[in-house]
Image (tube, rainbow, N blue to C red):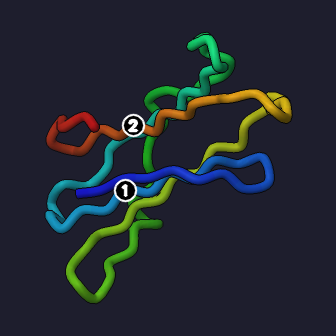
Amino acid sequence: MDYKISSRNGEFVGQYENSDLTERIKKYSFVICDENGNIVDSVVDQVHNNESDTRIADGQLISIDNYSYPISIERGKIYTVQYSVETMSGLKL
């Protein structure tokens, strides 16, 4: 299992990959913190749309969640973004 995050045009994209097709995402969260660790924006416990999941040839299931952030990201500042998921069986990553 693997998950990653990237940013493009005011949007964060979280991606979760798993070879266990029964371990599907139930909900997801994004938390943005500034360089001091203060939360500047978040979305928590959003329901994942399983219809957008993709199965690829090697048996992996890829799930993608998008989050359009309403804050201004200042140039030269460091921010951290946490993408977390909870699966149907209650596993939290």
Question: Taking 34 as reference, is 71 above or below it?
Answer: below
Q: Residue at x 49, y 26 (%)?
A: 44
Quadrant that contains the N terminus: bottom left
Please report whichever mark, 2 or 1, sits nearer to the chain's N-terminal start: 1
Which secondary structure lies at badge 1? strand
Q: Amino acid at mark 1?
A: Tyr
Residue 37 placement, left or right of 7: left
The picture quadrant where one finds residue 84 is top left
Q: Position of residue 80 (x, y in %)?
A: 57, 30
Residue 14 horizontal/vertical position (percent)? 50, 51
Q: Is residue 74 above or below residue 85?
A: above
The answer to whether 74 is drawn above or below residue 33 in the figure is below
* Residue occupying image coordinates x 40% and y 61%: 63
Q: Residues within 10 Å of mark 2 (few under 14, many from 20)?
A: many
* Residue, disc 1: 16
Left or right, 78 with respect to 13, comes to: right
In this orientation, which residue lies closer to the viewer: 49 or 77?
77
